[in-house]
Image (spheres, rainbow, N blue to C red):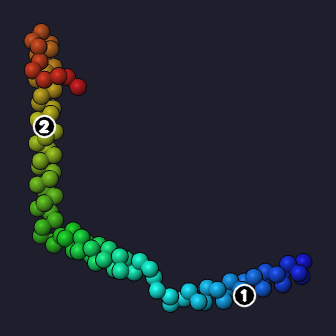
Amino acid sequence: MRPKLEYDIADASKRAKELETKVGAHFEREERYQQLTRRQSEIEEKLVFTKDQAPSQVDVVCEIDDEAKNSEVQNVAKAVRHKRRGVKPSIPLP
């Protein structure tokens, strides 16, 4: 058991010395990393809404969604009525 522990300690010491040389070494993709970090900050700034903008834009999206849903429901209802009457619907049923 003792030789295994001594081997593990020696191995850990060797690895520590190897890794010490890498601490503070030049990161080969540092420039690209910095470019991407700046780009991410720019995107995050553009995505930030002020308190006044966010509710009005959400309301517009909700209104558009409601109009689309209402239009779809009306089209389906119209097609069902036509089918019941034996009239060929102008839009296909889902």
Q: Is mark 2 on a helix, strand or loop?
A: helix
Q: Is residue 22 above or below residue 65?
A: below
Looking at numbered disc 1 in the image, what kind of residue is underneath it?
Ser
Q: Quadrant of the N terminus?
A: bottom right
Q: What element carries label 1?
A: helix
- The residue lying at 45 percent from left, 82 percent from top is 27
Of labels 1 and 2, the one closer to you? 1
Q: Is residue 18 above or below residue 47?
A: below
Residue 70 image-quadrant placement? top left
- The residue lying at 19 percent from left, 71 percent from top is 46
Looking at numbered disc 2 in the image, what kind of residue is underneath it?
Asn
Q: Quadrant of the C terminus?
A: top left
Total label count? 2
Please state which of residues 78 and 93 is positioned toward the viewer in this rendering: 93
Q: Name the residue under label 2.
A: 70
Residue 52 image-quadrant placement? bottom left
Q: In this view, does 2 lie above or below 56?
A: below
Q: Mark 1 points at which residue?
A: 13
Q: Position of residue 31 (x, y in %)?
A: 35, 80
Relative side of 34 to 84, left or right: right
Relative side of 19 to 70, left or right: right
Whole-Å distance between the Cαs marked 1 and 2?
71 Å
Q: Where is residue 61 in the image (x, y as percent from the top left)?
A: 14, 53
